[in-house]
Amino acid sequence: MRRLLRWVFLIGPCRLYILGELNGGVVPVAALAVMVAFMAVSGGVGALVAVLTGGKVGDALFNWGLGGLLVLLGWLVYSLLLYAVLWIAGRSPLTVAGLDDGESHARHAAGTGDSHWRRRGRDPLVPLSLAGFFLLMVGFLLVGSTVTAVQERKYGGEKVVVAGDVLRYDDGPGGFGKRHLVVRYPVGDELITGDVLADDLDLDRDVPRPGQQVDVEYLVADPHQVRPAGATKRVADDVAQDRLISGICGGLAVLCGGAWLVGRWRRRG
């Protein structure tokens, strides 16, 4: 039992890191296959329990499979925390996994390749690449939020919310496009037909079927500019959230860059 716990909480995460390093930072296919198999086994156990207890096999298969996925995600989060502790301690996953004796000449032991792990007392605690990562996130989030904000300008202005009737679905050429709902909604004494993106609906509600109703909002200045009710506010909240996260990443980039400079100055001193 002790060996099993050691492998799950120490050796396994370190070997996963080593496999990822050998694959250029990409999670290896073998690890993904093991994860899928774990989910399948979890679902199978749930289905067996449902058969023995007279429950619904389909529901048990899905719920237990989802539970297996959550367990895997929790283990991956734990692994990331373990890597952070090992990095601070200056102890490579190679040594923990028993593939390196800790000396520089053993970095290539067992064909594992160069670890590039922090050497305590010689390498900075915060790598400069971490600051670069946060700067990359800032650029990605700012560009995405700016493009979205520009696209949202056409929906700016006073809006009216009404109930529209779903006439049919439009899934694009060959049925491979984004789903649009063709709706008919009242504008004063007139009925107008338009389409709205199903992706713009509130995530907490199901896509209405043809014949059902859906709340839509249209511009007073241009009633043909229509979308699901509340979509403008949801997009604005997403833009604000992206900009907030980009600000946090910018602050972290400055902190990481400052920590790297301090560490470099201390080593030179």
Image (cartoon, grey):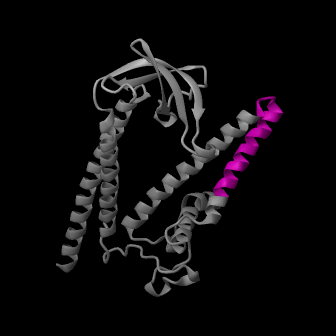
Let me know if residue 93 appears in the view: yes
Q: Is residue 5 above or below residue 22?
A: above
Residues shaded magenta: 34-57
Q: Which residue is more in the foreground, 112 or 144?
A: 144
Q: Measuring 61% from the left and 57% from the top, which residue is drawn there?
A: 5
Count of numbered labels shown in the rendering = 0
Q: Examine the structure image and report whether residue 188 is included in the region drawn in magenta.
A: no
Would residue 5 be found to the left or right of residue 55 on screen?
Answer: left
Q: Measuring 36% from the left and 65% from the top, which residue is drawn there?
A: 88
Q: Residue furthest front?
A: 190
Q: Residue furthest top?
A: 189
Would residue 258 be found to the left or right of residue 172 on screen?
Answer: left
Q: Which residue is more in the foreground, 230 or 176?
A: 176
Q: Position of residue 246 (x, y in %)?
A: 29, 50
Q: Position of residue 217 (x, y in %)?
A: 40, 24
Determine the main secondary structure of the stretch shown in magenta.
helix
Q: Examine the structure image and report whether residue 56 is included in the region drawn in magenta.
A: yes
Give the image quarter of residue 7.
bottom right
Q: Which residue is more in the foreground, 137 or 219?
A: 219
Q: Position of residue 195 (x, y in %)?
A: 49, 31
Give the image quarter of residue 151.
top left
Let me know if residue 245 appears in the view: no
Q: Which residue is more in the foreground, 190 or 39?
A: 190
* Quarter in which the N terminus is drawn: bottom right
Q: Position of residue 165 (x, y in %)?
A: 53, 20
* Quarter in which the C terminus is drawn: bottom left
Would residue 140 be found to the left or right of residue 79 on screen?
Answer: left
Q: Measuring 57% from the left and 82% from the top, which residue is drawn there?
A: 111
Q: Is residue 141 above or below residue 50?
A: below
Give the image quarter of residue 118.
bottom left
